[in-house]
Image (cartoon, grey):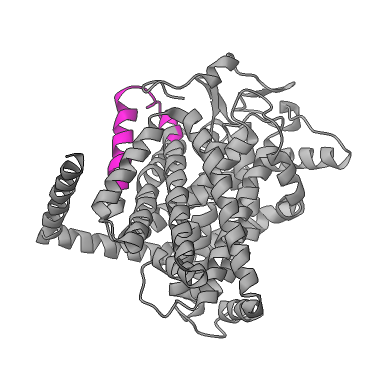
Amino acid sequence: MLGNLFGHSSEVIRGFFKNIGNSQLISTMAGNMEKALNFSNDILWGYVLIVLLIVSGLYFTFKLKFANLTQIKEMFKIMLEKKEGNGISPFQAFCVSAGSKVGTGSLAGVAIAISLGGPGSVFWMWVLTLIVGSLSIVENILAQIYKEKKDGLFRGGPAFYMEKAMKKRWMGIAFSVLLTVTYGLIFNAVQANTMTIAIENFCGIDRVRSGLIIVVFTAAVVYGGMKRIAKVSEIIVPLMGASYLLVALFVVGKNIGELPAVISMIFANAFGLKAIGGGTLGMIVMQGVKRGLFSNEAGMGSTPNAGASASASHPAKQGLIQTLGVYVTTLGVCTATAFIILFSGVLDQNLDGIGYTQAAMKVQLGSIGDIFLLLCIVLFAYTTIIGNYYYGQTNLEYLNADKGLKIQIFRVLVLVMVFFGAVRESQFVWNAADLFMALMAIFNIYAIIRLRKPAIQAMEHYVNGRKIGMDPIFTTNVLDDNTGVECWDENGEVPLEDEDEVYVEVPQKAEI
């Protein structure tokens, strides 16, 4: 009986969307919107973002004395440290932000980049990652320095340091709204889109039905608060990430004889010397940078929302641990996906995004690989959805919309967009994601350039302390100007008022 009811409901919903799609007015509006998205993305990604990311990334790499490259061992050490206070642990903060990164950007986004820009796009992903790791350090240090306390947890992010340090409340509001829409709504539509396409490719289940199931499971977590989000991410992300990398290493070992040829293909195509896929050098670079940023999010201002929620003895620790997530995502998971696709020779097929990755895994491991990848896609995308929701909720809290009706409306909109993405064609939702991602990066990079001094001072204090064998404690004395700093004093991090409050299950209407 329940199955018949569910099937009837899905038929009604499918018919509703079909009728909407047949409306000439709606079709015309959708076509014009898509043209506007394409035009905006061509300008932003073809000129503005590539220059901004590379120039700012190189600038901070030099100003931080290459800490993004020399402190990788320290990043792993910090990740394994125990929780220092009564916020979430460094490992949990890492998992929440990594769960937001290791999603469709690492599985479908790489496939899209290679199919449109060719194998050389992978090279530009690598280059971008090594450069923009410095942006991740800076934005997360700033989030820790200018975080605040509320309802038993720390919270912070770009909106907070734009207001507290830059004294630009309007800019914080604009960024907060932008991030809430981008992550809570647009990016979650992308994740749901990839999930339902992958499920349909695998077993033919209608995307309306699978979309409804995703909505139900999303609702179960987003109504549970940050504690539940952190716990779910802490379990799923390391398990599936490690499993996926192990399978990828097996595939590389299986095709080890072809590895030199694949790497040579990547480098030859990277500079337009060998036209494959998209062909032109501009397209190759643009796809690599675009999909690289989507997968690692460095400089976008997203991961600082998770980084600020952790207790830490020093802001630099969160800067380093969140940057480790950048490297794990792009240099690890994205590279693994790229190699699997290039080993398999599936680029000549006419597939849609994640379909290339699925076809490649099936070539390499047969039906077992197909099942394993589907599981990875569903779990990666699911943790991304709930991580994205947390980013959106944190910024609603900044707007003082954390009680009552407003937060409930946001939750409903998240679920609506999850379903919208589940049933919509992929190109539209990816284009919308690219536009909002670019706008976020422009806002945030401007802010961290303006606030470079406290971030650089904090990083220098930490690195210099570690050189002489100390575990440095950050105090406000480290900064020349401590204006806007609330959660640190001359003794270090200011503890929260009620430690037990952190461990209480969050009621439905009580926000973190």
Name which quarter of the figure residue 312 lies in. top right
Count of numbered marks = 0
Is residue 261 a member of the stretch shown in magenta? no
Residue at left 40%, top 26%? 400
Which is the main secondary structure of the residues drawn in magenta? helix
Image x and y of residue 215, in percent: 31, 42
Which range is magenta? 394-419
Image x and y of residue 295, in percent: 51, 56
Quadrant in which the N terminus appears: top left
Instruction: Please give left or right for residue 454 compared with residue 274 in the image.
Output: right
Question: Who is closer to the viewer here, 215 or 50?
Answer: 215
Residue placed furthest toward the front: 1
Residue at left 22%, top 62%? 32
Residue placed furthest toward the bottom: 274
Image x and y of residue 391, in percent: 46, 38
Instruction: Please give left or right for residue 10 compared with residue 502 in the image.
Output: left
Image x and y of residue 337, in percent: 53, 64
Residue 168 in view:
no
Residue placed furthest toward the right: 468
Name which quarter of the figure residue 216 lies in. top left
Instruction: Please give left or right for residue 273 compared with residue 228 in the image.
Output: right
Is residue 417 a member of the stretch shown in magenta? yes
Up/down of 435 relative to 43, above or below: above
Residue 184 in view:
yes
Name which quarter of the figure residue 509 lies in. top left
Up/down of 471 relative to 21, above or below: above
Residue at left 14%, top 46%? 8
Instruction: Please give left or right for residue 413 compared with residue 65 in the image.
Output: left
Question: Who is closer to the viewer here, 285 or 10?
Answer: 10
